[in-house]
Image (cartoon, helix red, strand yellow):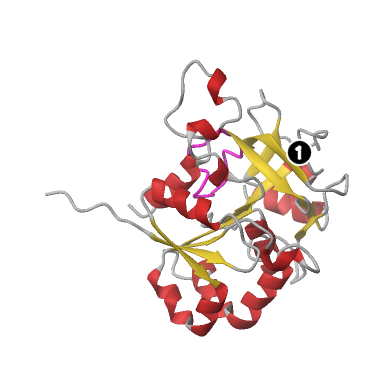
Amino acid sequence: MSSAKVQPRVLVLRAPGTNCDEETAYAFEQAGAVAERVHVNRLIENPALKDRYQILCFPGGFSYGDDIAAGRILATRLREHLAEMVDSFVHGQGDRLVLGICNGMQVMMRLGVLTEGAGQDDLPSATLAWNNHGRFEDRWVHLVVDPDSPCVFTRGIDKMYLPMAHAEGKFVARDEEALESLGSQGRLSLRYATETQTDVVDDILPFPINPNGADANVAGVCDSTGRVFGLMPHPERHVDATHHPFWTRRKEQPEFGDGHAMFQNAVDWFA
């Protein structure tokens, strides 16, 4: 008699200005998870709600209007009121996952949970800065995955084609030592690439291939365990094959869009 398939529960965190929570919840549900959109104020009032979930997701949008800097206000609220919750997902018993998408990655970078352990001190080893051209950029990008990365979300994925939409998404390492440390650990999991590229490259590719000028073409970063991952492109916006901008021109349609595999990897990790 086979056992029932495990259905992880996903906490999709909402805040004023979040606008990708419904799509992200849908993407997790399509992969077999149970997703719930929960407002940050509700968690502050009742932090014990965190115990219901196995996956914490910070979706995209403009939390608190991105006032001061992208993701900073939400990160500050989490640090001041929900630090124990964040710590339980990031540094718990290893049975939980954390995903941050676009504004969610910005929040995670402000919290320091993506790059910790990459430097020789407690100073941040990397940050996200304004795009090189100083404006919001919205386009589809080609991506390659570092095959040596421990990232749970990118397992078995070689390439992806996803949309990105951000103004502060340029990954900037503090120095060469920090960049080398992250790269040698496989933590620079996702890189911008050309359409035909199959391997990661460290030399910065030109715009628009690298849409923001990120160091080493970094589009996504994971922690040392691979359970905590943040990326600037939007996988939830390409979970269906018809999300592809040229889907009507394809002779054969795949079953899913490229982003679906990331959410499926998260669900399958609990099987």
- Give the image location of residue 133, x and y in percent: 88, 44
Q: Residue at x 54, y 57 (%)?
A: 21
Q: Residue at x 69, y 52 (%)?
A: 182
- Give the image location of residue 104, x and y in percent: 63, 59
* Residue type pointed to by label 1: Asp
User: Residue 151, relative to residue 106: is it above or below?
Assistant: above
Q: Residues within 10 Å of mark 1 (few under 14, many from 20)?
A: few
- Give the image location of residue 172, x and y in percent: 80, 53
Q: Residue at x 54, y 81 (%)?
A: 44
Q: Residue at x 53, y 19 (%)?
A: 250
Q: Is-magenta flag for residue 215? A: no
- Comparing 64 with 154, the one in front is 64
In this rendering, would 184 be left or right of 1? right
In this rendering, would 69 be left or right of 156? right
- Give the image location of residue 246, x and y in percent: 59, 25
Q: Is residue 116 visible?
A: no
Return the residue at label 1: 202
Q: Secondary structure at mark 1?
A: loop
- Comparing 194 with 165, the one in front is 165
Magenta region = 145-159
Q: Residue 18 is drawn in which quadrant?
A: bottom right
